[in-house]
Amino acid sequence: MRQVDGDSGIVIDPRCTHLKAAMMGGYRYKRNVEGVIDKNKHSHVAEALQYLMLHISYNGDASMQTVKREVIPVAAAGWT
């Protein structure tokens, strides 16, 4: 649906009906009255794609490589 520098931004197999439904508006990130994120049947597949995209990068030669992020330890004191 979208092109980046003349190439597809992402190509999804037509058989991935759950993922397509999630990306076409089924997945919404919103908080309810208690501040908890509302989850629906589209949440898991959409978040799985989101995690994949966070951890890979395009290498220019059609291969994918993992991206390592620096892990910063944080004290849990004061968290509820």
Image (cartoon, rainbow, N blue to C red):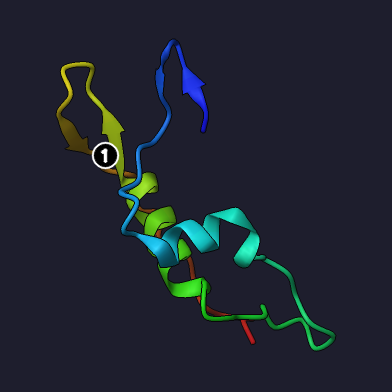
Which residue lies most toward the top here? 5
Q: How many marks?
A: 1
In the image, residue 29 above or below residue 61: below
State the residue position of label 1: 67
Q: Position of residue 59 (x, y in %)?
A: 22, 22
- Going by the image, does 67 lie left or right of 18? left
- Going by the image, does 61 lie left or right of 45? left
Query: At 70% across and 83% down in the image, what residue appears?
Result: 36
Q: Nearer the viewer, residue 13 or 41?
A: 13
Query: At 64% across and 87% down in the image, what residue appears?
Result: 80
- Going by the image, does 43 lie left or right of 37? left
Q: Position of residue 34 (x, y in %)?
A: 80, 88
Q: Position of residue 6 (x, y in %)?
A: 43, 11
In the image, residue 76 above or below residue 21: below
Query: At 79% across and 82% down in the image, what residue appears?
Result: 32
Query: At 44% across and 73% down in the image, what residue appears?
Result: 44
Q: Position of residue 3 (x, y in %)?
A: 48, 21
In the image, residue 56 above or below residue 51: above
Q: Nearer the viewer, residue 36 or 60?
A: 60
**Amino acid found under the numbered disc labelled 1:** Val
In the image, residue 19 above or below residue 10: below
Which residue lies most toward the right here? 33
Res 15 → quadrant: bottom left
Q: Nearer the viewer, residue 7 or 28?
A: 7
SS for dot 1: loop
- Going by the image, does 40 lie left or right of 38? left
Q: How would you rate the neighbour count of disc 1 (Cα within 10 Å): few for under 14, some for 14-19, many for 20 or more?
A: few
